[in-house]
Amino acid sequence: MDVKKNGEVSFWHADMGGLPGYRPALPGDISVDICIVGAGFTGLWTAYYLHEADPSLKIAVVEKNFAGYGASGRNGGWCSGEFSWSRDRYLSTGSREGVIEFERQLRSTVAEVQRVTEKEGIDCDFLMTDCLSYAQSPAQFDRLQKSYEEAMSWQVPTTRLEMIGAAEASERIRVDRAHGALVRHGVARVQPAKLVRGLAKVVEKRGVTIYEQTEVTRIEKGLVTTARGKVRAKKIVRATEGYTHGIPGNEREWIPMNSAIIVTEPLPDALWDQIGWKDSQLLADGAHAYCYAQRTREGRIAMGGRGVPYRFGSRTDTNGVTQPATIGMLKDILYKILPQTRGLALDHAWCGVLGVPRDWCTSSGMDPKTGIGWAGGYVGLGVSTSNFSGQTLADLVLEKDTIRTSLPWVNRRPRKWEVEPFRWLGIHGMYQLYHMADAREARAGGKKTSAFATLANKLTGR
C-alpha cells in the first residue's frame, strides 16, 4: 500500500519538524525525593501536579527514549474524559456513588487540560468540539442506543450525550449510509505530540529534571535501577503504561495492544464541502472492530484502528513502523465511512501500543509498604485519563486524603493476563471474531448484532 512515510514514530512529530533531540541521560547514581519512570502524559502530569503542590520537591523523570516517544506522541488526539470500560466493574471496589463521582471527575479533565495548556502557553491545537459515533446499519444504531441508555441510567451530572437520527447525523458529517449517531459533547481535539512535548518543557522550567536515553531495568522499594546508574528515591511512580511489561515483575500486568493510524494529504476545500465535516468533530463508527478519526489543524484526516492487535510475547514495534496490510485495512475503512475520499494520497502511517489490563479497566494506586505508585491501563483513552492520573498520583505520593484517592479505580488489582501462547490466541481470536461479526452483519443487511461479537467479549472478558 502506497504511503509516503511509515513509522518515524508518528506524523505528529513530523508535523513539528521532526523528532526532537535527546535530553542528557542519567549521569550516574543520584538521590531525589521522587523518581518517575516514563516521560509520557502520565509521568509528566504527575510531575506537574507534584511540583504545584510542593515546589521544594526534588523530582527526576527517567525515560528510555525521549519525552513523548510512546503512546503520548502517537495517539489519535482524542481528549474525551471517557471511561475505559464498563462502569459496573468498578462496583467491585466502590459504591455506585463512587463510580458516578469517578466519571464526573474524568469528564472534568477535558476542561482541566484546556486550563493548563492556556495557563502554560502550550500550543497543541486544542479545540473543544463533539465526538460523533456513527451507525452505518440498524444493528450499529441499536448498539449505540443501548450505550446511550446505559450511560444515562447512571445519571452522571456532567454526562452530555444525545442520540441523533440519520438526517441530523448527515448534516454534521456525510458518512455513507448513516442511520444516526451518538454525540458526546464537551470533548476536545489535540495534537498529542505538541501537548506532551510542551508539557515536558513546562515541568523542566519548573525544576523537574528529565533524563532521556535511560532505560530502567528494575524498580524496587526506594530504588530505580537503570542502564546508566541508580536513582534512590523516597517515592517512585511507574508511569510506563503500554511498556509496563518490560519492567521485571510486571510482564503480565497490562498487555501492549497495538493501534495504527493513517494520515491523508491535506484535503482541498471543495472536498471538505462534499464531506460536510466543518466543525472538526471527532469521528468514530459503530463497528465491532472500531475506528477513530479527527480533522487535523491543517485539514487532513487522521484515522486509526487496531490492525494487528497484539504481537506474540508482548513485543512492540520499531519506531512506529506498521504493516502494509494494516495500512490497507485503515484505508478501506476510510473509504467505507467517507467514500468521497477515494483517490486521496496517504502521507503517513504508524503504530504504537496502549496498556490493556485483564479486566479492561484503568487503575491507579500506591503501595504504602514499598512507596511505589502506578497508573495506566487506559485502553486507548489516555489523553484525558492520564491527566486525572497525574492529579491522583500527586495526592497519593504526598499522602493526601482527597476525593480522588477514595475513588474506586485507586488500588484496583485485576488478575494478570494468561501466559503465552494463550493470551496471543485469546486476543487474536477476539479480534477475528469482531471482524467476522462485522462481515456477517454486513451480509445480513446489518439488521441484528452478530453472536460472534458476544462470543468475542466472553473470550477475553472485555
Image (cartoon, rainbow, N blue to C red):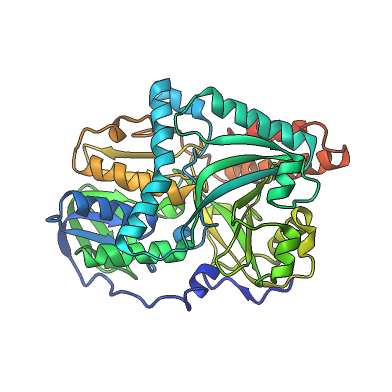
Q: Is 145 situated left or right of 274 in this image?
A: left
Q: Is 362 situated left or right of 306 in this image?
A: left
Quarter of the rendering containing residue 137 = top right
The quarter of the rendered structure image containing the N terminus is: bottom right
Q: Nearer the viewer, residue 6 or 392?
A: 392
Q: Residue at x 72, y 73 (%)?
A: 345
Q: Is 114 situated left or right of 450 in this image?
A: left
Quarter of the rendering containing residue 24 = bottom left
Can you name the residue that lies furthest to the left here?
56
Q: Residue at x 87, y 37 (%)?
A: 444
Percent x, y for residue 193?
Answer: 45, 65
Percent x, y for residue 116?
Answer: 33, 55
Percent x, y for residue 18?
Answer: 48, 77
Q: Is residue 232 above or below residue 322?
A: above
> Can residue 69 be seen from the camera position used here?
no
Q: Is residue 342 above or below residue 460?
A: below
Q: Nearer the viewer, residue 415 or 1?
A: 1
> Can residue 421 be seen from the camera position used here?
yes
The quarter of the rendered structure image containing the C terminus is: top right
How many marks do you count on the picture?
A: 0
Q: Residue at x 76, y 64 (%)?
A: 341
Percent x, y for residue 168?
Answer: 71, 42
Q: Residue at x 69, y 60 (%)?
A: 326
